[in-house]
Image (cartoon, helix red, strand yellow):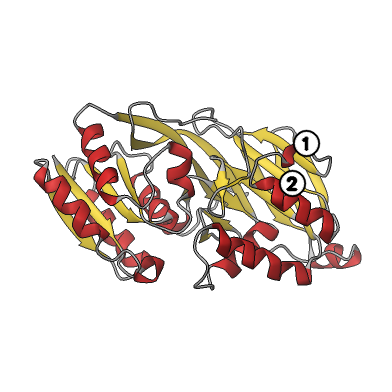
């Protein structure tokens, strides 16, 4: 089978620059033809991947494998969404929240490559899962590289923490997210939103706002314990304004997935969700800040307003035979 292997050696600050060579060797030894492409940036890697896939009947590869963290998995989804080309993930990042949800190996390149070979050989699974499609509320298209995601779209303090964590070089994994969260506490204040779901509209202040297709964020925090990327629905989570002490308590509970019982946490399941910032005047009159720049799968998305939709069976993943695609 002809496989496109896509990597960005600079991702993760180069900590896993040789992982793609290991994956390529194992897949080649298994009998696959591997077209290895290294991109020096997100945009370059995406363009290279799109070129390899092409359009039917001129497609050059039968599967895409990405090497890196959640950002590379996000890029892979962006390339293969709505095609029949399956996506394999060699998770070598700091968080690996997508791999965690689907029961994939984390930071074990050899095990990841063997699993991909098994799935392609019929000994594993090729499973269709939902993906999140982003557009403007009026249907206007976003830039091509900012339309699809797989895990979580964050638009509150969760996004602000994500942005800050991306600037930190230490510690690894969830420790970096914890450090960024602690720093964000210093300027804690609610944001102003208008949120529309399948059930109706809500307007007001919130600290956290996220739409989840899978469970985890921030290197293992169980944001949406019941998220199921095969049910055609997003888990829309909102946190009312609370004080710093209570927020710290909720943050600790987030790692165990027990935060949903707090009355300040609201959960709604919806096929679509539209997120808008309150107007500058309305938000200012209520003492509310404009929401931060949204993130998707840990990568910057387009600015608000956004309409997010769970698209069933948008991506085919190469998974273990007994994969956990749901909660």
The x, y position of residue 154, in whole percent, is: 62, 54
The x, y position of residue 232, in whole percent, is: 54, 30
- Closer to the chain start, of discs 1 and 2, is 2
> In the shown orientation, is residue 178 left or right of residue 53?
right
Name the residue at 91% across, 66% down.
285
The x, y position of residue 178, in whole percent, is: 63, 61
Q: Relative to the observer, which residue lies in front, 51 or 261?
A: 261
Q: Quadrant of the C terminus?
A: top right
Disc 2 crowd, CA 10 A, few/some/many (<14, 14-19, 20+): many
How many numbered markers are drawn?
2
- Helix, strand or loop under label 1: helix
Name the residue at 79% across, 58% down.
192
Disc 1 crowd, CA 10 A, few/some/many (<14, 14-19, 20+): few
Circle 2 sits on which residue? 238
Q: For residue 160, which quarter of the picture?
A: bottom right
Circle 1 sits on which residue? 261
């Amino acid at each position: 089978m002809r496989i496109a292997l896509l990597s960005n050696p600079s991702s993760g600050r180069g900590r896993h620059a040789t992982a793609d060579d290991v994956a390529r060797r194992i897949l080649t030894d298994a009998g696959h033809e591997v077209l290895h492409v290294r991109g020096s940036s997100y945009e370059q890697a995406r363009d290279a991947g799109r070129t390899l896939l092409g359009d039917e009947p001129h497609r050059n590869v039968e599967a895409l494998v990405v090497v890196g963290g959640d950002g590379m998995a996000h890029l892979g989804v962006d390339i293969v969404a709505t095609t029949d080309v399956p996506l394999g993930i060699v998770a070598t990042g700091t968080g690996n929240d997508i791999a965690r949800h689907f029961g994939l190996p984390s930071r074990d390149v050899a095990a990841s490559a063997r699993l991909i070979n098994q799935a392609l050989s019929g000994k594993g699974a090729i499973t269709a899962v939902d993906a999140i499609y982003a557009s403007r509320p009026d249907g206007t298209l976003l830039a091509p590289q900012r339309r699809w995601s797989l895990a979580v779209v964050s638009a509150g303090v969760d996004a602000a923490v994500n942005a800050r964590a991306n600037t930190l070089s230490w510690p690894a994994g969830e420790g970096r997210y914890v450090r960024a969260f602690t720093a964000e506490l210093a300027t804690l204040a609610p944001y102003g939103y208008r949120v529309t779901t399948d059930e109706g509209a809500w307007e007001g202040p919130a600290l956290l706002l996220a739409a989840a297709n899978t469970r985890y964020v921030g290197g293992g925090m169980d944001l949406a314990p019941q998220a199921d990327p095969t049910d055609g629905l997003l888990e829309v989570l909102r946190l009312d304004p609370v004080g710093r002490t209570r927020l710290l308590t909720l943050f600790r509970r987030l790692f165990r997935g027990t935060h949903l019982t707090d009355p300040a946490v609201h959960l709604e399941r919806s096929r679509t969700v539209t997120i808008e910032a309150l107007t500058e005047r309305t938000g200012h009159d209520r003492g509310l800040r404009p929401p931060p720049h949204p993130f998707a799968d840990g990568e910057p998305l387009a600015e608000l307003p956004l309409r997010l939709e769970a698209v069933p069976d948008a991506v085919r993943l190469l998974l273990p035979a007994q994969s956990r695609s749901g909660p």
